């Protein structure tokens, strides 16, 4: 394949590249929906004046209306949080969803399901107090994550996830407030909230999509990359310097290569390592995969000997260091729900693997290829 898109993605490529020739609108809709791309498709159809079947046009328009309403609801929540944070002197850094949406041609084009904040480690008690005062309640599940237990509002609203580090690799916290505090800026849309400047935010998105999720979060990450960098000029020089310093040059190179494949053109810059064909093929497979939820074994495995596998097993069962930071009562609730969560999340995958499911085995293989290349420093 050598980085070529599977046949079922050729229609999506036609839409975003301006070609407009679509063989099956129904198949395109079925592809776009799980990747949260319907509002973006609606925008592209209107911009390119495409002729669309009535039922498809209706579905796209409905997705646009819903996206606009969701964005207004998110902004209302953020204004409330920002006002309270500002009143008590809490530093809250908004990342991903709403901030990324603001670089799209229309902010409603970019869907998200939660509101992510980075806070200083010492500010966690104050952040919890702010959530409680605003009516948010933590929900303890058996899910292992790099953030505090998610906070849910009473009634309708987006869940809030509060991080003291945006990633963790090899037992080391990465993208902490201390690490990023010199690269913060006020978020202009909501008083009282900070966000990352453009270049470090893009590098974090590359780390999140390529390094953390191994592109299992789907095609939306490529749209993020496209709109985040579409107007960049001098920013590329800073991105090259920071990516090299943070060990993310290959993550960025892979993200930009995938984005170029989807848009049917060459990469926007040659400042970053280009993946070899077999790595790009693995990334394409990962980003469009519709298999079961795949555990990121090769990302989390510290090394491939017995000691490494035992360490990985301990991390899976214990939930990792974030869980150990919880109060005892929360830890007990986590461990009570952990076994059922593991069965729900990964039982179908393991069963598929054991019975020889081709898609599952290919997904595991693709993960191994991606991790091996991104971690190589030669």
Image (cartoon, helix red, strand yellow):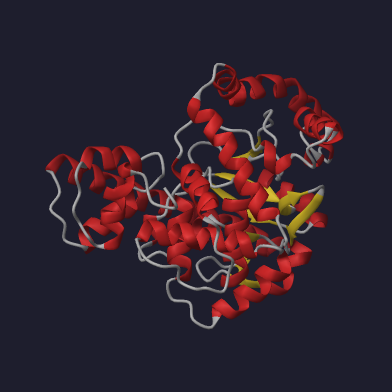
In the displayed structure, does residue 289 sit left or right of residue 316? left
Residue depicted at x 16% and y 39% = 55
Which residue is depicted at the point 60% across and 73% down? 239
Residue 323 pos. (x, y %): 79, 37
343 is higher (above) or lower (below) than 25: above
Residue 319 image offset from top left, x and y in percent? 76, 33
- The answer to whether residue 145 is seen in the rendering is no
Residue at 20% in and 41% down? 24
Based on the displayed image, in which of its 4 quarters is residue 72 positioned?
bottom left
Which of 294/136 is in front?
294
Nearest the camera: 343 or 136? 343
Identity of the residue furthest to the bottom in this view = 234
Q: Is residue 20 left or right of residue 293?
A: left
| Image: 234 above or below 367 | below
Q: Is residue 197 left or right of residue 144?
A: left
When the figure is inspected, residue 258 is found, relative to residue 7, above or below; the finding is below
Query: In which quadrant of the rendered view does residue 354 lie?
Result: top right
Residue 325: x %, y % from top left: 83, 41
Quarter of the image where the C terminus is located: bottom right
Q: Is residue 34 shown to the viewer in this render?
A: yes
């Amino acid at each position: 394949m050598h980085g070529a898109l599977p046949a079922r993605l050729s229609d999506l490529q036609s839409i975003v590249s301006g070609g407009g020739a679509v063989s099956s609108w129904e198949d395109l809709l079925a592809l776009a929906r799980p990747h949260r791309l319907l509002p973006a498709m609606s925008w592209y159809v209107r911009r390119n004046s495409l002729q669309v079947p009535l039922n498809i046009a209706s579905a796209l328009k409905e997705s646009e209306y819903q996206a606009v309403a969701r964005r207004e609801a998110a902004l209302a929540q953020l204004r409330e949080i920002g006002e309270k944070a500002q009143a008590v002197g809490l530093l809250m850094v908004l990342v991903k969803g709403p901030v990324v949406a603001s670089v799209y041609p229309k902010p409603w084009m970019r869907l998200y399901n939660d509101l992510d904040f980075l806070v200083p480690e010492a500010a966690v008690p104050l952040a919890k107090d702010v959530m409680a005062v605003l009516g948010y309640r933590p929900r303890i599940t058996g899910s292992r994550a790099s953030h505090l237990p998610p906070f849910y509002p009473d009634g309708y609203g987006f869940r809030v996830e509060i991080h003291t580090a945006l990633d963790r690799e090899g037992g080391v916290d990465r993208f902490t407030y201390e690490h990023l505090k010199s690269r913060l800026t006020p978020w202009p849309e909501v008083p009282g909230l900070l966000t990352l400047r453009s270049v470090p935010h893009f590098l974090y998105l590359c780390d999140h999509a390529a390094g953390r999720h191994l592109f299992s979060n789907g095609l939306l990450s490529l749209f993020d990359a496209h709109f985040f960098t579409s107007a960049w000029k001098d920013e590329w020089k800073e991105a090259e310097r920071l990516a090299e310093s943070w060990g993310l040059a290959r993550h960025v190179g892979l993200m930009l290569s995938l984005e170029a494949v989807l848009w049917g053109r060459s990469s926007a810059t040659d400042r970053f390592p280009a993946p070899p064909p077999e790595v790009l093929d693995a990334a394409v497979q990962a980003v469009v995969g519709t298999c079961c939820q795949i555990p990121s074994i090769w990302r989390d495995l510290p090394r491939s000997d017995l000691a490494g596998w035992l360490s990985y097993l301990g991390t899976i069962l214990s939930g990792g260091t974030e869980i150990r930071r919880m109060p005892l009562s929360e830890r007990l609730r986590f461990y009570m729900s952990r076994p059922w969560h593991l069965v729900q999340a990964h039982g179908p995958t393991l069963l598929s693997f054991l019975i020889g499911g081709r898609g599952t085995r290919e997904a595991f293989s693709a993960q191994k290829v991606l991790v091996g290349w991104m971690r190589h420093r030669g």
